[in-house]
Image (cartoon, rainbow, N blue to C red):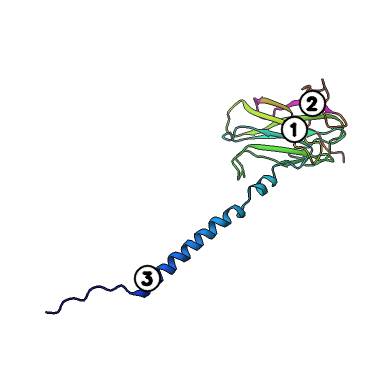
Amino acid sequence: MLEPEPFESDDSDVVFRDVTMLTLAGFVALVILMLPHLNPPGARQAEGNEPPGNVMVEIRWPDELDADVDLWVKAPGDVPVGYSNKGGLIFNLLRDDLGNRADATGMNYEVSYSRGIPPGEYTVNLHLYRNVSGVFPVPVTVVTSVKRNPGESARQILASRVELTREGQEVTVYRFSLDAHGNLEQGSVHSLQQPLRSWRAKS
């Protein structure tokens, strides 16, 4: 009876395994070395953190509410800017939020930016255009910031929280004055009602 020959490993299998493992190890090492350079933290911070305008007015209301709140702003000597007139000489409405309608972000937010900081009185209004959710009141946070020159960060000068209680309601959140250097003038802040939405361009 013949005895089975002892198992002998094939040298080509060992070489193939070693080459495969070395290639895989080299690939992993290459990926680890490249990770910090794919999306450097410094580039992420430099991109888009600083707002583009000089006077910025932002509004936020609860994301779960299907409500269309409109921001209206007016700069000195300019026309009111809002959903039906998205740009003037000074302000531009950059985001017109319609609530849950055609909203890819799921965030209830509107913002206007100015080009320059002309001295004089500014007006910030809110208008509850539609409230599909039927929940009242609708709380809205309003923040105004100023960036006097490209080299400095925007600084918040005013903030307020307003509750809108019915559809069609327009309220003046605040009116304020800035001086020639972009500083908030002492004692200039008040909320005397000034309708902006009903403004119409003269033909």
Which disc is residue 175 wearing? 2
Q: Which residue is mark 1?
A: 155
Q: Nearer the viewer, residue 164 or 10?
A: 10
Q: Is disc 2 placed on a helix, strand or loop? A: strand
Q: Which residues are magenta?
A: 163-178
Compared to 192, does 104 lie above or below? Answer: below
Q: Nearer the viewer, residue 85 or 17?
A: 17
Q: Is disc 1 placed on a helix, strand or loop? A: strand
Q: Amino acid at mark 1?
A: Arg
Q: Quadrant of residue 53?
A: top right
User: Residue 179: x percent and y percent?
Assistant: 86, 29
Q: Between disc 1 and disc 3, whose residue precedes?
A: 3
Q: Which residue is mark 3?
A: 14
Residue at the image point whose x is 43% and y is 64% from the top? 21
Residue at the image point whose x is 76% and y is 30% from the top? 124
Q: Amino acid at mark 2?
A: Arg
Is the Cβ of the residue at disc 2 closer than 8 Å to that at disc 1?
no
Residue at the image point whose x is 76% and y is 39% from the top? 113
Nearest to the eye among marks 1 and 3: give it. 3
**Disc 2 versus disc 1: distance between alpha carbons?**
18 Å
Nearest to the eye among marks 2 and 1: give it. 1
Q: Quadrant of residue 55?
A: top right
